[in-house]
Amino acid sequence: MVFKTIRMDAQGLKELPASLANEPDLVHLSVYDNALTHLPEWLWSLQKLQTLNLSVNQLTTLPEAIGLLDQLRMLDIGHNHITTLPEALGNLPALTDFLYLSDNGIQQLPPTLTKLTSLRYLNVTDNQLTALPENIGRMRGLIELRAYRNPLTALPDSIGSLSKLRELHLDQSPLTSLPASIGELHDLRVLSVRGCRLTTLPVSLGELAQLRHLDLRGNELTDLPEPIGELPNLEKLDLRWNHHLTRFPRWLETLEDRGCIVFR
């Protein structure tokens, strides 16, 4: 089956052409890299839309009417000027593939977002988030979570309930510690906390049996929990620019002998 697709990327558009209102069977719409400042009411009548790319525009708001697009599987509103998100964003039952909110100025994620229990990819990088939702653990479908370059100071304990998570990226956030529950992410392959302010690491990291890549560059660590050395699938451990880490444990050599790349 061929689904109707319209791409109007990088055309200098300041508003969506009204002719699109006459496309009730439209499934994929991309208006990436234009100059849109608002979205027309008729857009929400295109209720067969499954993918909507509004990234790299000049939008300042996302209307509550987004909740009418109940077949939407992918939404990209990255690289705009949106500071608040509508509660209705969490009322999109088909939103399972991709939600990209990066580089806006968003200060808080609506609590309803955690109703997206089948969403697989969430990107909230380069915003003004000081916290993730306390019950983010409800989003059990997440495979990849990117939240780097936000003023996050802590992670909720419920993050350990993201049982399918394979990649967690938190770089360049002022985190000083990670919750012990992070050790419950038994499917995690990549943990990147480069350029944070971590002074310690939880011993529970040693429970991440599937972990391949652990990026700890540019933190304030003074020691490393020994269970890291027992991670059976670790392929790369990056410890560079931890200037308070003056003594390296001998088990790092054991990791290297096993084939793990260790940068110090």
Image: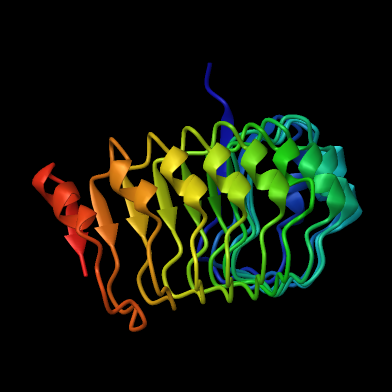
* The C terminus, quarter of image: bottom left
Who's the residue at 74% across and 30% down the image?
71
Please say if 166 is above or below 205. above
Please say if 222 is above or below 233. below
Q: Quadrant of residue 120?
A: top right
Q: Is residue 99 left or right of residue 227?
A: right
Residue 102: percent from left, percent from top: 60, 64
Colour scheme shown = rainbow
Q: Is residue 44 visible?
A: no
Residue 79: percent from left, percent from top: 59, 69
Front residue of 56 and 240: 240
Please say if 224 is above or below 165. below
Residue situated furthest left in the rendering: 257
Who's the residue at 44% across and 75% down the image?
195
Please say if 111 is above or below 211. below
Who's the residue at 48% across and 67% down the image?
171
User: Number of numbered discs present?
Assistant: 0
Q: Is residue 117 left or right of residue 166?
A: right
Q: Quadrant of residue 238?
A: bottom left
Q: Is residue 133 visible?
A: yes
Residue situated furthest bottom in the rendering: 243
Front residue of 163 and 104: 163
Residue 256: percent from left, percent from top: 13, 51
Who's the residue at 85% across and 46% down the image?
112
Residue 38: percent from left, percent from top: 79, 67
Front residue of 123 and 138: 138
